[in-house]
Image (spheres, grey):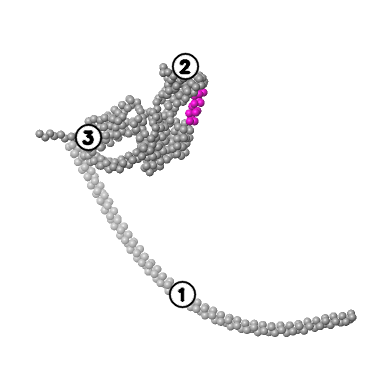
Amino acid sequence: MLDEILLGGLTATVSGIVGFIISKKITNANFDIYVDKAKAKAGVIENEAELLLQKSKLKSQEIELEALKQYENAKDRAKADLSQREDDVIRKEQSFKRYKQNEENRIQDESSTLKVKRVDLERNEKSINLLKQRYESKIDEALHAIEHSAGMTQAEAKVVLLEKVEEKSRAEIAHIVRKCENEAKVEAKKRANYILAQATSRYAGEFASERLTSLVHLDNDELKGRIIGKEGRNIKTLETIMGVDIIIDDTPNTILVSSFNLYRRAIATKTLQLLIEDGRIQPARIEEIFEKVSDEFEASILSEGEELIADLKIGVMHPELVKLIGRLRYRASYGQNALAHTLEVAHLAGMMAAEMGGDPILAKRAGLLHDIGKALTHEQDGNHVSLGAEVCNRYNEHSVVINAIYAHHGQEEINSIECGAVCAADALSAARPGARREVLESFLKRVTEIEEIAFQQTGVKQAYAINAGREIRVIVNATLVNDDEAVLMAKEIAKEIEEKVQYPGEIKVNVIRESRSVVFAK
């Protein structure tokens, strides 16, 4: 059984080997066929490639020949163009040489002509100088002859001639001035009246007249003795420390505090009121209360200045300027409170500047600071204009503010709309009726000076200062002064008043001329 199995396996193995050999031979036979076919196809492809290569070579030769032909043609054209340009350059060069030669010849001719003219000019100049010397000598001789015959020197004759010319031209000048003024007044007066009316109608300021004394009320007259103190020690201490005069008279339940310095008087009044409430009136207590009140006033003027600046909405300001603004409440000019006047000017200036197209905020700032120097005049030497300008420069205020400080008293020209508004508002606030009061003697002196200035003019018959010295009416002789000369006379009087008289606001100069012809028919 085993042998059969082995025999069968061997037979199968042999059969497989024989089959493998037979199949391999068959496969090799087929491969050879494929190889032969591939070689045949490769030969065909090779022949086709050789044909294409030959065709490509022929095509490239044709293209090369065509390109060479085009190159030769382009080369010939370039040579021809270059030759033509060389000819053009040669022709231009020859033309430039001819032009250069012509210009050189022309310049040489002109140079020779100039030399000839220069020689002629030098000769003419010498001749002119000789003629000028002869002319001057003849003039000198004529002048000597005229001086000898007229009995006057040349300078005297010139003065007389100028006076005659001025006298003859005076009427013509006056007529021109009058005509120009009338033309300007037609529009200027309407515009000015409108602006002033708008400003004054929109702002109505309060007026408070400052006095030189303050009243302190007492519960009974026994307190007067305590204020005086033993041998007058208390009242002497009060007057020495506070710098005021305390007047105790027979007026019941009242004492007076007198001082030109409103700030000191206000502190003294408050100190006395606190001492009376406290009841302990003695030198040590007086000093203590006085120091306390002084500190409170310093704080109050700073806070008051800050409130005013905030109300006006004019921006940030240096604390020292703020304190000076608050201190203006305790300053007065001709009885007008300085702070009230300053606020009035600030509001009016802002409205006027807005009407005229300026900056209302800057105008308000300049109006608020235009009299800031008045808060310093009792502490430092100098007028309030220079002191105010100095302190505003120190704290870098705007140039318009500085110009307003100087210009509102005529020390500088007005350089801006805002400055002009401040000056107009200052005059309006100070000049309105009842705004200020002044001493009778100074008022009479000013009125007399104004009338004397008017009487110095030629042809004046009468002159009257009226309207509290704010207007002068000058009556002239109609035969000596005509209508045009009256205009010039008014200007001359106004100019002399500005130069010689100190006054608040403005003064109206009114020159009146009248001529009458009376004939009786019989």
Q: Residues within 10 Å of mark 3 (few under 14, many from 20)?
A: some
Decide which of 378, 229 is in the foreground and name it: 229
Q: Between label 1 and label 3, give the one nearer the viewer.
A: 3
Give the x, y percent position of residue 160.
Answer: 22, 37
Say what amino acid the circle numbered 1 marks.
Ala
Residue lying at the far left in this picture: please name it. 522
Q: Between label 3 and label 2, give the one nearer the viewer.
A: 2
Q: Earlier in the sequence, mark 3 or mark 2?
A: 2
Mark 3 to mark 2 CA distance (whole Å) = 69 Å
Mark 1 to mark 2 CA distance (whole Å) = 136 Å
In the picture of the structure, the residue carrying the numbered disc 2 is 222
Q: Which mark is residue 513?
A: 3
Image quadrant in which you'd find residue 221: top left
Q: Quadrant of the C terminus?
A: top left
Q: Between label 1 and label 2, give the one nearer the viewer.
A: 2
The magenta segment: 288-300
Give the x, y percent position of residue 345.
Answer: 39, 35
For the point 36% across and 37% down, the residue is 200
In the picture of the structure, the residue carrying the numbered disc 1 is 74
Mark 3 residue element = strand
Say what amino acid the circle numbered 2 marks.
Glu
